[in-house]
Amino acid sequence: MNYSYKGKILISTPDISGDIFSRSVVLIIDHNEQGAFGLILNKKNENMSSRLLEIFGFQVTVYEGGPVEKDKIFFICKGEKITEEYLDLNDEYYVTEDIENVVAAILDERLSIDHVKVFAGYSGWGIQQLDGEILRKMWTPVDVYNLDYTSPNDQSLWKNIMQNLGGEFLLWANAPEDVSMN
């Protein structure tokens, strides 16, 4: 491995269609010689959101982190660390699986629900798999600055980033979801 995509955003190309990665925006949390780990930022999971409302007693929007281990919950948190079990994304954000401390911090008002994004599952790649997918142009890696990882996002995030890239990406941003209909 010559390059790490850790901290980068991956934008799926329109060629990826019909699965969870169609029009996905993935934040790469970690990438090393063993593989890569990321979370999809723009795919809401309505079913899991309803289940967590019943459990927690307050509204939580859950996002599809990816197709791997969908029963695992991950959190991107903004601000002060409320757990010792975390992985830094940058100076402002971190990722944790520590559901106990995150929920306790929200209930104790030490952490605003607006500073937390919840994910079910994750996106994972084996050794050199992500590099190969990028070479085959399944993904476009992008440096995105000033993106609030905890803000609510939907499909407009994918389209907005594509439009900002310009050129051929602008064409993709305006293509129909089913490119065969074009």
Image (cartoon, helix red, strand yellow):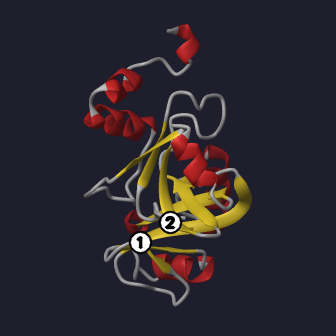
| Residue 46 horizontal/vertical position (percent) | 61, 45
Q: Mark 2 points at which residue?
A: 29
Q: Farthest residue in the top direction?
A: 182
Judge whether residue 172 can be spotted in this image: yes
Q: Name the residue under label 1.
A: 89
Identify residue type, mark 2. Answer: Ile
Give residue 119's quadrant in the image: bottom right
Identify residue type, mark 1. Answer: Leu
Q: In this view, does 38 lie above or below 16?
A: below
Q: Describe residue 80's horizontal placement relative to residue 131 as left or right.
A: left
Q: Describe residue 69's horizontal placement relative to residue 9 as left or right.
A: right
Q: Which residue is drawn at 60% across and 79% down?
A: 98
Q: How far apart are marks 2 and 1 (CA)?
A: 7 Å
Q: Farthest residue in the bottom direction?
A: 84
Give residue 164's quadrant in the image: top left
Give residue 19's quadrant in the image: top right
Judge whether residue 64 can be spotted in this image: no
| Residue 34 horizontal/vertical position (percent) | 65, 69
Mark 1, other Cα within 10 Å: few <14 / some 14–19 / many ≥20 = some
Q: Describe residue 118's horizontal placement relative to residue 153 as left or right.
A: right
In what quadrant of the picture does the N terminus appear? bottom right
Q: In this view, does 9 lie above or below 154?
A: below
Q: Which residue is drawn at 41% across and 71% down?
A: 89
Q: Which residue is drawn at 35% across and 73% down?
A: 90
For marks 2 and 1 on the same chain, the one whose residue lies earlier in the sequence: 2
| Residue 73 horizontal/vertical position (percent) | 64, 66
